[in-house]
Image: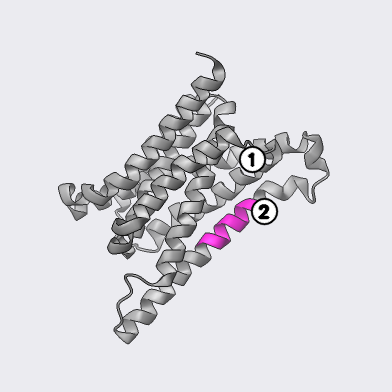
């Protein structure tokens, strides 16, 4: 088996795991109950946060140095800050979308209207589908950095997807069950396919990684902070400690 085929299968495996997460999240709460489900989500978010601070932020610094070595990157505006600006854009864009949905929920609650199928929730779900597409596209970049980088990235993203899928279904179970999970799953596979067929320039892949980092930071933090009454701190802390220990063990 040649390297290209091996890489394609590895990234396909990661994308398939994401698809399973989006569908499994729909029925596992019925099997496990709300309390167990919430503890699992908090544990997963804690692991994802550990990935952000122990692995992803240092990787952004390394990636910026690599970007500066590319000839085409030097012709771009502010190349030394490009990845961090992309991260800021991802953070602010998705925080704004989450805030839009929260504001709409309060407005509908005050008016006594049903908010299950608001346009705001549809926009948020579609935006996360685009984000899933980008995450799976970046898989192709991570596999070029080695199987270890791909494994760490895919595992952290899977935990992250578990958390925001829970949030989407909590905000609108009907939207998530009817079409949201299908769109998210399709976006994961489409991102993998497009990465194989239409690889983007290296500098653009680096920029997308920054964007993914910004959304990941925003979502993993706000998923616990925004709903402190629902959060399970012990599970969150345990997840963070466990994954930090794993990352330190595999660190070069």
Q: Residue furthest top?
A: 1
Mark 2, secondary structure of its residue: helix
Q: Which residues are magenta?
A: 86-94
Q: In the current view of this chain or complex, which residue is farthest to the bottom?
A: 111
Q: Is residue 85 left or right of residue 105?
A: right
Q: Is residue 143 above or below residue 172?
A: above
Q: Are marks 1 and 2 in contact (CB under 8 Å)?
A: no
| Residue 59 % position (x, y) | 60, 37
Query: Is residue 89 on the magenta stretch?
Result: yes
Of marks 1 and 2, the one in the foreground:
1
Residue for point 35% across, 57% down: 179
Characterize the local packing of mark 2: few (<14), some (14-19) or many (20 or more) Cα atoms within 10 angstroms: some
Residue positioned 39% across, 46% down in the render? 185
Determine the main secondary structure of the stretch shown in magenta: helix
2 up-or-down from 84: above or below? above
Return the disc, 1 or 2, that comes first in the chain's sequence: 2
Foreground residue among 163 and 202: 202
Give coordinates of residue 61: x percent, y percent: 65, 40
Residue that numbered label 2 is attached to? 85
What percent of the width, then of the height, locates residue 88? 61, 56
Q: Nearer the viewer, residue 215 or 121?
A: 121
In the picture shown, does residue 148 fall above or below 176?
above
Q: Report the disc number at residue 205.
A: 1
Q: Which mark is residue 217?
A: none
Q: Residue furthest front?
A: 197
Determine the residue positioned at 57% across, 62% down: 92
* Residue 238 visible in the picture: no
Residue plotted at (50% across, 51% down) = 131
């Amino acid at each position: 088996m040649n390297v290209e085929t091996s890489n394609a299968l590895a990234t396909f495996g990661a994308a398939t795991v994401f698809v399973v997460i989006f569908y499994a999240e729909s029925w596992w709460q019925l099997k496990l109950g709300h309390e167990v489900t919430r503890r699992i989500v908090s544990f997963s978010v804690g692991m994802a946060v550990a990935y952000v601070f122990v692995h992803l932020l240092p990787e952004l610094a390394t990636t910026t140095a690599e970007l500066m070595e590319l000839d085409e990157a030097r012709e771009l505006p502010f190349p030394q800050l490009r990845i961090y600006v992309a991260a800021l854009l991802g953070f602010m864009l998705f925080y704004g979308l989450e805030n839009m949905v929260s504001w709409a929920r309060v407005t509908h609650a005050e008016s006594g209207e049903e908010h299950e199928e608001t346009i705001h929730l549809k926009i948020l779900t579609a935006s996360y589908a685009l984000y899933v597409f980008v995450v799976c596209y970046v898989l192709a970049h991570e596999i070029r950095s080695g199987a270890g980088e791909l494994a760490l990235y895919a595992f952290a993203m899977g935990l992250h997807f578990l958390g925001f899928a829970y949030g989407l279904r909590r905000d609108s179970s009907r939207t998530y069950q009817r079409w949201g999970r299908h769109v998210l799953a399709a976006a994961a596979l489409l991102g993998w396919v497009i990465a194989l067929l239409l690889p983007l320039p290296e500098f653009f892949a680096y920029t997308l990684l920054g964007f993914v980092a910004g959304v990941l930071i925003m979502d993993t933090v706000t998923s616990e902070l925004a709903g402190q009454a629902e959060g399970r701190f012990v599970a969150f802390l345990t997840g963070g400690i466990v994954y930090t220990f794993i990352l330190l063990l595999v660190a070069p």
